[in-house]
Image: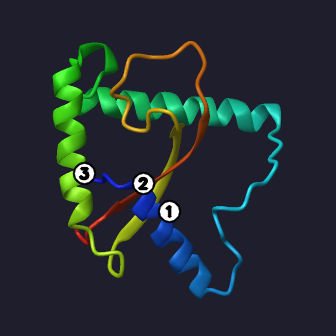
Amino acid sequence: MICNPALAAERANSRQGQKGEDVNMAKSAKVTLTAAEVEMAKAMAEQSRERAAKLGLESSGMTESERQEFLAICNEAGAKIDPETAEVDWTYGSVLDPYGIFPPLEEDNVGRNYFARSPGQ
């Protein structure tokens, strides 16, 4: 299970920084997307929702106690990830609800969600 976005971003900064790139994710930047890029991001977010549904994480089917249990498991797993060896990946999806476990909002913010995991997990 990939559960610690903050650690993932830190690890991504560390790895990319080793290549000599300036990747300080704390800096703000204005990004302008084309209509095609927006549509692609929306499609990827929908794919993320579908994957979450296949994993049993449908937002409409999770109770508050189930959400809290899921997040506790993620926090516990995330605390065990070694930043020096973590594998980092990202996908486009809801930055407000990267796991798709909360009821849908009228408006959402789609962007990159970074995830870390222990090697081989």
Give the CA separation, mark 3 to mark 2. Answer: 10 Å
Position in image of residue 29 (x %, y %): 78, 54
Residue flagged by tag 2: what amino acid is it? Pro
Q: Earlier in the sequence, mark 1 or mark 3?
A: 1
Left-right relation of 29 to 54? right
Give the CA separation, mark 1 to mark 3. Answer: 15 Å
Residue at the image point whose x is 28% and y is 75% from the top = 82
Marks 1,2: beta carbons within 8 A: yes
SS for tag 1? helix
Residue at the image point whose x is 24% and y is 15% from the top = 61
Left-right relation of 79 to 96? left
Q: Residues within 10 Å of mark 3 (few under 14, many from 20)?
A: some
Residue flagged by tag 1: what amino acid is it? Ala
Q: Is residue 60 above or below residue 115?
A: above
Depth check, mark 3 against mark 2: the one in front is 3
Q: What colouring style does the render use?
A: rainbow
Q: Is residue 56 visible?
A: no
Position in image of residue 11 (x %, y %): 46, 71
Position in image of residue 24 (x %, y %): 66, 69
SS for tag 2? helix
Q: Residues within 10 Å of mark 2 (few under 14, many from 20)?
A: some
- The answer to which of 113 and 46 lies nearer the viewer is 113
Q: Is residue 68 above or below residue 81?
A: above
| Residue under label 1 | 9
Residue 75 is marked as 3
Residue 6 in which image quadrant: bottom left
| Residue under label 2 | 5
Depth check, mark 1 against mark 3: the one in front is 3
Residue 89 in which image quadrant: bottom left
Residue flagged by tag 3: what amino acid is it? Asn
